[in-house]
Amino acid sequence: LPPVPSRAPPRPNHHCLAGRDLVVWRDGAGAWSVMSDACPHRLAPLSQGRLVGGRLVCSYHGWAFNAQGGCTAIPQMPQPGANAGALAKACGVSYPVRQVDGVLWVWLDNSPEGVAKSALSEPYVAPEASGSAFEWVMNEVPNDFPCGIEQGMDPTHANFLHVGIGMFKSENVIPMPPTTIPLVDPHTGFVWFHSGYEKKNEGMRAIREFKPPFYVRARYTQERGGKTSTISLNTMTVPVRPGWMRTWFKLAFAPNPREEEYGGGGVPTSSASTPARTHEPAALTATSSAHSSGADAGHNGSSSQGAAAAAATTTALATTSHTTQALVPTTSDEQPKEKPKQGGGAAAGIFKLLGKLPHWVSLNMELLDQDTVMMHIQGRLMARQGLTPRDYRLLAPGADAGVAGVNRWLRQAGYPASLWGALPASSPHAAAAATSNGGTNGAGSAAASGSAGAFLAGEQLPLERLLDTRERHVKHCAVCREGLVLVTNACYAATAVAALAAAYTLCLAAVAQVVKGSVAAGGAPLAWAAVGAVVLGLAAYKLWGFRTARFISGLPAWRRKGGLSLIPASIKAM
C-alpha cells in the first residue's frame, strides 16, 4: 500500500488491497497495525476515525480499538469492562504485519494457522535492493495485475513504447536469440536467462526472476570500458482491485553474478538466486476467520460476491511462496544491519548521490505515463471483447519468452478466481472468456484461464485521469506532498520576482520617455533590466512547468509531444 512515512502526521489511512478495504495506523508505542476498515458496530470506516491515547477511535459512535483489534471502550454501554463477552464480540479484524526494507508486509489470513505461518515467513526483497541508496517508488494506476507482471518480463517494449525518452531508439533494436523457460513453478516462479535486445547491450547477460506472486528482479551484467558491472531493476506489482494495481520500482547496483548462476534450465542454481525457505506459505486472499469473512463481504460491494471471494478455494496463487503476503509499504526508520556490497564503480557513486535527493528531483514520470496508457487501453479492450492472454500471438521465441512464462504461472495459480473469487455466471465477460478458452483448448472456464481481462471493472478512463500524477502518486507519497509545497512556494516567489523585474523595467522605460535626453544615457540600464525581466520570467515559466510535470499531470507534455502516435522528429522510424 502507499507509503506512510514516520514523519507524516499520525492519522489512520485507508487503503484497498486485493479487494479488501484496510485501515493502517500506528499505536502509542509506534507499532503498526493493519485492520479491516469497518467498525464492527455498524461497519463505519475506521479510517475516518481518530487516534486517541494510542488507540483507534471510531468517529461514528466512539468505539475504541487497540493495535490487535481488541475493543477497549464502548461509550454507550454501562460498565463495558464488566462485560467481557460483549467486548469480545466487538473486536475488529486485524492482520499480522511486519516491517522490512521500509515496507510493511501484511499477511491477509488472521486465522490461528495464518498467524502462525506469518511468524515463520520472511518477505522476499533482493539483497541489493535492500541495500540500495534509492527508496521504493509507488504509483497506483488503473492497470490490471497480470499486465503489470507481463510488463516486467517484456524488456523489448522499451525501445518502441518509450522511443525518444533517454537513450531509447527503435532503430537500435536487435532480434533476441530464441530462449525457453523449461520450468515454471506455482510456488517459486521461474527464471529467464536472456541476452541483449538493442545494439548498446548486445553482449549483455541478463537474469530475470519472477518471485510469486508480484516480484520481478532483473539483473543486467555488461562489460563497459574493461569493467564488468551489474544493474538490478526491481519491480513489485500489487493487486488493488480488479483493473487496478500498485506498481513499485527500485534501482540498485548488484554484485556480478557467479558463472554457475547462468544455468539450471530455468531455475536458480545458487542460494543467491533463491534463498532457502523452511516454512509453509500463507494465502494471499485465503479464507479468514468467520468474523473476517463477514466484514469483508460487507465492503466488497456485494455481500454474495464478497462471501464467494472469501470462501474461494485456496489455489496455487493462494498457496505460493513466501511472497504471497500482501504489501503495505511505508518509509522505515530501521536500516538493515548489514547492507550488501554493490558494484557499479563511478556510476554507482553517482546514483548513490542521487539517492540522497528526494525522488521527485530526478524521477521522470513520462515512462510511467506511457506504460499506464498502453496497458489501460489494452486491458479495457480485452474486457470489452472477452479476450484473454490465450489470444496473444507470441511469435518471437526470444523476446516473448518472459510473457509466456508469466501466463503459464497465472494458469497454474488459478487466476483470477484464486485472487478475486469466482466470476458471477451472469457476467458477460465470464461468458466471453469461457467461450474463448473453450474454443482454444477446451478449458471452458474463465476462472481457470488466467484471464487478464475477463473481469476488469469500469470503462476506459479519459487521458486526464490516466496522466493525473497527483492522484496516482503524490497523494500517497509524503515526500512528494512536501515537495509540492516547496516547489509551489518557489514558483510563487519566482513569479513575484519576475513581476517586480518587469515593473522595474517599465518604470525605467517611462522615466526615459519623460526625462529628455535620458534615453541615450539610460539605455544600458534599461536594456539590462529588460533582459533580466525576460530571464526571470522564463525561469518562473520553467519552474511552473516542472511543478506540473513532477506533481500534477503528464497531460501537457503528452499533448505537446503528440502522445504515442507521433514519433519525435529526432528519432528515425523503423
Image (cartoon, rainbow, N blue to C red):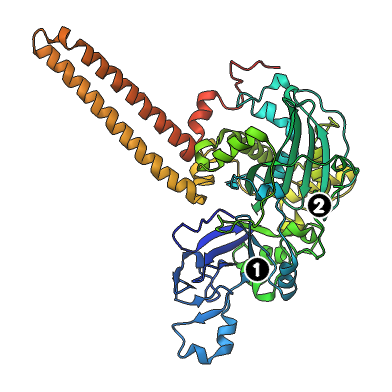
In terms of secondary structure, where does tag 1 sit? loop
Picture coordinates of residue 99 (x, y %)?
62, 61
Query: For mark 2, what is the residue?
Result: 274
Q: Nearer the viewer, residue 318 or 362?
A: 362
Inter-mark Cα distance, 2 to 1: 25 Å
Picture coordinates of residue 244 (x, y %)?
63, 49
For residue 340, say whether it is visible: yes
Work out whether mark 2 precedes mark 1 in sequence or the reverse, and give the earlier one: 1
Residue placed at 86% from the left, 28% from the top? 177
- Label 2 amino acid? Thr
- Label 1 amino acid? Pro
Query: How many numbered badges does the structure rendering display?
Result: 2
Q: Are marks 2 and 1 in contact (CB under 8 Å)?
A: no
Q: Quadrant of the C terminus?
A: top right
Answer left or right for 323 relative to 19: right
Residue placed at 43% from the left, 43% from the top? 484
Relative vertical location of residue 95 with respect to residue 335 in this rendering, above or below? below
Q: Nearer the viewer, residue 174 or 524?
A: 524
Relative vertical location of residue 190 with respect to residue 289 in this rendering, above or below? above
Residue placed at 60% from the left, 45% from the top? 133
Residue placed at 46% from the left, 68% from the top? 49
In terms of secondary structure, where does tag 2 sit? loop
Query: For mark 1, what is the residue?
Result: 96
Q: Quadrant of the N terminus?
A: bottom right
Answer left or right for 255 relative to 569: right
